[in-house]
Image (cartoon, rainbow, N blue to C red):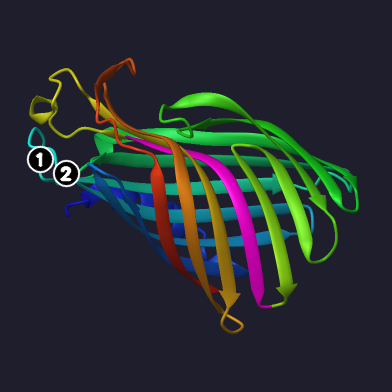
């Protein structure tokens, strides 16, 4: 795959700050979503780091690459296989104003397109939120985000209420994700998640699409999943995921995000495996 200047540009943000790191992690993940008429396989790789300054400021940077392969075994109207690629570099800055308030800002340039990545497909996501520390085990998060959670690039509110019942059990309820975590010991974490997730890709050649005025493809769903993460040693972790997707959609869109074609994929299960290295 030719990524050319696109990947080099996104990689720059990671390299420029690498020497400042005081923690680092990398992960490799695979995910599959079989349906009656379409099968989706995803592979992703990401590296991130973070550093805290004077206990008041923190910077974080995450570079991620994702490849999505779509096969159409029962669809004679479209290509037998379609590949979508995405590369992003998310930079975060946090200010710990006091024991009661924290400010977080994230900026994420990304490129997402069919087949080859091109710098002309560059877009920008971001998020700004405020954490209100209510007491030692409760936190309220309120903010806004420009994102693709619902399969369209838009600005949406984000919010979450976090409650730590004890050292083994904590709960987070909000949008776009709610999560319940339970750890029976220092090496095992069980999670029940409910999350909105989506993505938008620019089409490489609209004339090859089912609808000639299509310029984008859109994926979105609400996923309920059960995950198990095992700490293999001090650095290596493995995560297993099984989930079910509700309101799963795969659409072709025009420039105004009007639907030009609906693949009518069905709701169904998804399975994932992630290997992580943390230092």
Residue holding disc 1:
79
Can residue 12 be seen here? The reply is no
271 left or right, relative to 184: left
Q: Where 275 sits versus 250, above or below?
A: below
Could you say where residue 7 lies in the image, as x and y percent from the top left? 30, 51
Q: Main secondary structure of the magenta part?
A: strand
Q: Where 152 sits versus 201, above or below?
A: above
Could you say where residue 147 lies in the image, as x and y percent from the top left? 49, 33
Q: Looking at the image, tell me whether mark 2 or mark 1 is earlier in sequence order.
A: 2
Residue at the outermost bottom position:
233
Rate crowding at label 2 as few (under 14), some (14 to 19) or many (20 or more) other CA atoms within 10 Å: some
Image: magenta residue range: 187-200
Could you say where residue 108 lies in the image, as x and y percent from the top left? 48, 41
Residue sitting nearer the eye, 120 or 219: 219
Residue sitting nearer the eye, 104 or 244: 244
SS class of the residue under badge 2? loop
92 left or right, relative to 125: right
- Find out whether the residues at labels 2 and 1 contact each other: C-beta distance under 8 Å: yes
Label drawn at residue 72: 2
């Amino acid at each position: 795959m030719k990524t050319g200047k696109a990947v080099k540009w996104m990689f720059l943000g990671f390299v420029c700050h690498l020497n400042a790191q005081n923690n680092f992690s990398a992960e490799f993940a695979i995910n599959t979503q079989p349906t009656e008429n379409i099968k989706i396989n995803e592979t992703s790789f990401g590296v991130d780091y973070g550093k805290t300054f004077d206990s008041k400021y923190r910077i974080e940077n995450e570079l991620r690459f994702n490849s999505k392969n779509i096969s159409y075994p029962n669809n004679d109207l479209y290509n037998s296989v379609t590949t979508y690629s995405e590369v992003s570099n998310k930079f975060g800055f946090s200010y710990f104003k006091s024991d009661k308030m924290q400010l977080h800002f994230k900026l994420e340039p990304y490129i997402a397109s069919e087949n080859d990545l091109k710098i002309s497909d560059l877009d920008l996501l971001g998020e700004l939120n405020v954490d209100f520390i209510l007491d030692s085990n409760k936190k309220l998060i309120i903010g806004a985000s420009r994102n693709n959670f619902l399969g369209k690039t838009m600005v949406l509110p984000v919010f979450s209420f976090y409650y730590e019942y004890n050292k083994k059990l904590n709960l987070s309820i909000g949008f776009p994700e709610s999560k319940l975590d339970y750890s029976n010991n220092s090496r095992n974490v069980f999670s029940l998640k409910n999350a909105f997730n989506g993505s938008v890709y620019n089409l490489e050649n609209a004339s090859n699409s089912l609808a000639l005025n299509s310029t984008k493809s859109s994926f979105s769903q609400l996923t309920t999943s059960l995950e198990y993460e095992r700490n293999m040693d001090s650095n290596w972790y493995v995560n297993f995921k099984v989930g079910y997707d509700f309101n799963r959609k795969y659409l072709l869109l025009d420039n105004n995000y009007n639907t030009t074609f609906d693949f009518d994929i069905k709701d169904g299960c998804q399975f994932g495996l992630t290997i992580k290295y943390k230092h």
